[in-house]
Amino acid sequence: MPFSANCPSCGAAVVFKSSASFHGVCEFCRSTLVRHGGDLENLGRMADLIEDASPIRLGTEGRYRGVRFAVIGRIQLRYEAGVWNEWHVLFDDQRGGWLSDANGEYLISFLTPPGATLPEFSKLMPNDEIKVAGRDFVVTDLEEAMCIAGEGELPFPFGAGYPAQLVDLRTTGDAAAAFASIDYSETPPLFFVGESLPFAAFKFANLRGEQVAKPAGVVKALQCPACGGAIAIHDKAVQSVACPSCLSVLDAANDSLRILQKAEAATRIEPLIPLGSVGRFAGKDWTIIGFQRRVIRTEGVDYPWQEYLLHHPEEGFRWLVESDGHWNWVTTISKPPRYSVGLPTATYGGETYRRYSAGSAATSYVIGEFTWKVKVGETWEIIDFIAPPKIVSREASHNETTWSLSEYLPGEELAAAFKLKTPLPAPTGIGMNQPNPRRESHRRVCGNFWRFAALAVVAQLLWIFVLGGSTLLDQRVVFSPGRDEPVTTQNFRLEKEARSLVMRHDTDLDNNWLGLGLTLVERKTGRAWIAQSDVAYWHGSDGGESWSEGDRSRELVFRDLPAGDYYFVIDPEISAEKPVAVADRVKVIRDQAAWSNFFFLLVFLAALPLFTRYRMTAFEVERWKNADFLSTGGDFGAGESGSDSGDDD
């Protein structure tokens, strides 16, 4: 039940909506109050909150898994990269929870028993894998923050200025997506579990009026303290801004724009797409608010690329990344891929990505707004894993690890989205995750191959079992030694012209040979076709090894015979070395299916897909020539590499 009392400092009514809340801040005089039964104790004035443009406020309502909640309190924390809010929420079923809106990401979590002793803060590092509450997590961020202000109802004793060591955890791999955090400000530490969801998933109501349905545009318009140039800040999540005029890096935490880094002499870089440009992607307008150039130096050679920070007032932030004319649309991943340090692959969304490159990326140039305190010279360790047309990238610092997903974006689509009047530079070389342009043609050729091969198989089977291969003669004869007369077969009739006529001999030869003089005669016209053949079969053993040579059977083919009545005259020659009788089964078959033609057709059909496969593979070989990590057994045709050749950290 709600509890209400008067503030001992100003007399205003103070309402506690949750029975679990025993700490609050008077919204009128900002006195810090603690409940003692039915009384309130004043602990002193709470520090003022830092102004921000968060759409959430006390009284904001939303829904999570079908249950309504209301925001009843907030604490504001400062860390190295800026400031974020933790909102205390109360559900209709009287559960309490926490909603975080750091850097445009919305996380909801709940206090959960860890089930075991939590590891010490000092012993954790980014990418460490730990098991808490029966679930596997990976450490993604370690921060030493300071609580600077608060408001509303809170479920614990609270005062500005207390330090908070915090660890963020994420599930990986096939496990259900989850976010967790460990708060070391209390003993024992507190463990919270929840998930990251899009802003729209919470179905918020009663947001700050000036933020509702506000189009992409300027939140604040300020002046640079170094040169007086105009500065625009588009979102409360922006933590720093680099002046486009003098290149000084400024702190965006308040309107004074404290100088974080003075500009050094540098060659000015004009972004290919100017800051402030609005591009339309998937039906939403995105504004370019920041630009930075980053570079990896390898063996004295610089490999630069450009990154553009995009902002949408509801969707948050995305990146456009350009390298050698190749563009990618980049989204931060809330659930890290399954990856272990040193392995050559990472798995995300059920797909395997293979390592392509790694190195220390340094920021060399910045202008515009950023969601962290950016500075020229900062470095992150980057590893890129590819499964064209996608990349998953890991960026790690001493205390934080982030993952992102990149999807290849053709320059023509990008130019159309921003309605650019000047064409973008054409791509050079092969992009890291550029789709293989020969893959689709290879797929079509393979599809046609299988269709034609299936037709060939059907035609061959029809010819064997239905249309061809009719037996016209099946006669047994015996060739005896000393008998000089030829053997005449029975008559057989060709009702129509025969494309081929096969005469087959199946003998009982045993370490012997037989010569055959053959004459095919058309009975009415007397026309004759003469051929010569022989059959030989030898076998035995040598040193315990069996061997054989030749065949007891033989086939002879006559081509393009007219219709008529026919018979064969067979003049045998029996070996003088082994003069024994030889039995022969003579079969005459018209238009017998020829397997050799069938196999020749398959070889002919396979030539084109083999050629397109070669061309596709050649493209992948060229792609991997640009990598610092080469395949030792991967399938280039699939755009994948093999095993690792060294450490990546």
Image: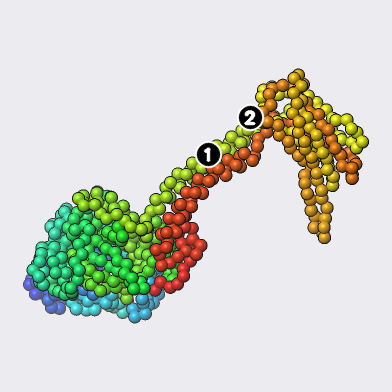
Residue 355 picture quarter: bottom left
Classify mark 1: helix, strand or loop: helix
Q: Residue 240 carries which label?
A: none
* Label 2 close to label 1 by CB (< 8 Å): no
Seen at 58% across and 40% down, the residue is 601
| Residue 423 in sight in this render | yes
- Model colouring: rainbow
Tell which of 307 and 107 is nearer to you.
Answer: 307
Image x and y of residue 342, in percent: 44, 71
Q: Which amino acid does label 1 sit on?
A: Phe
- Please tell me whether residue 489 is drawn above or below residue 100 in the rendered image: above
Seen at 72% across and 21% down, the residue is 564
The residue that disc 2 covers is 467
394 with respect to 451 (left or right): left
Image x and y of residue 617, in percent: 46, 55
Seen at 43% across and 46% down, the residue is 441
The residue that disc 1 covers is 452
Q: Residue furthest right?
A: 482
Q: Which amino acid does label 2 sit on?
A: Leu
Seen at 9% across and 70% down, the residue is 227
556 with respect to 303 (left or right): right
Residue 225 picture quarter: bottom left
Q: Which of marks 2 and 1 is nearer the N terminus?
A: 1
Image x and y of residue 222, in percent: 10, 65
How far apart are labels 2 and 1 at the CA level? 20 Å
Image quarter where the C terminus lies is: bottom left
Q: Report crowding for label 2: few under 14, some 14 to 19, many 20 or more residues within 10 A (C-alpha).
A: some
Residue 563 picture quarter: top right
Tell which of 32 and 483 is nearer to you.
Answer: 483
Image quarter where the N terminus lies is: bottom left
| Residue 85 in sight in this render | no
Classify mark 2: helix, strand or loop: helix
